Amino acid sequence: MTRSAPRERIIESARDLFRKHGIRGVGVDAIAEAAGTNKMTLYRHFGSKDELIAACLCRAGEEAKEDWGELAAEFPGDPQKQLHGWIRMATACAFDDPRGCDIANAAVELAEPDHPARKVIEQVKTDYRAALVRLCRDAGASDADMLADALCLLVEGARVSWQTVGAAGPGARFVEISEAVVAAFIRQAQVQAEAQAEPASRQPESGLV
């Protein structure tokens, strides 16, 4: 690990250990040692292990936000391509790291509703869904909220499938299923637009004399 600032080393070391051993399976002594520092320094930057956990999840949320910028840069001015790019990005993330999503894993481990990380988990997931809704709307989906929810559920389910039964399980069809769902929502929007654009002469008469 490069000799970055102690706070950064602590966060990166903690994230790595949490991924390998779980949040509950790692103590502050192990984190401090991995970061090349000591407990006194760790507690000077973070008042508690719980506070450190929350900071690690905030960092994961910041990285998730960067994904949207990368998609916009790769497919400038083309939200449909960005949406298809998101599907492939989600697939790559899941296959590249079989340990799964930091946020989702933390949500399972940290069941206490008053844990300081719970608010971070909720905010990150809420922000991510909102960004996906905007992308679905810009891509021309008939119901952006429903499409975004469908894609969120698909990716969460695929991630669990990959973690449990591997790449040969149902998660292997994530791209195929997601592409079909996106196509259906966009086609529905096109059908609705065509119906609204029909000339008035083709609309049913009101029955009034």
Image: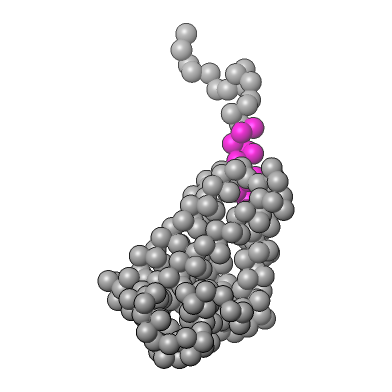
Q: How is the protein colored in the picture?
A: one colour
Residues 36 and 193: in front is 36
Residues 136 and 109: in front is 109
Q: Position of residue 19 (x, y in %)?
A: 52, 82
Residues 150 and 109: in front is 109
Q: Is residue 46 above or below residue 68?
A: below
Inspect the magenta stretch and tell me whether residue 76 lies in it: no
Compared across the picture, whether 20 is left or right of 194 comes to left
- Residue at image coords 63%, 45%: 139
Compared across the picture, whether 120 is left or right of 198 comes to left
Q: Farthest residue toward the top?
A: 209
Q: Quadrant of the N terminus?
A: bottom right
- Residue at image coords 56%, 75%: 4
Residue 112 seen in this snapshot:
yes
Residue 152 seen in this snapshot:
no
Point out the stretch of residues depicted in magenta: 181-194
Instruction: Count the labels in the image.
Output: 0
Q: Position of residue 99 (x, y in %)?
A: 56, 81
Q: Position of residue 130 (x, y in %)?
A: 48, 52
Compared across the picture, whether 9 is left or right of 199 comes to left
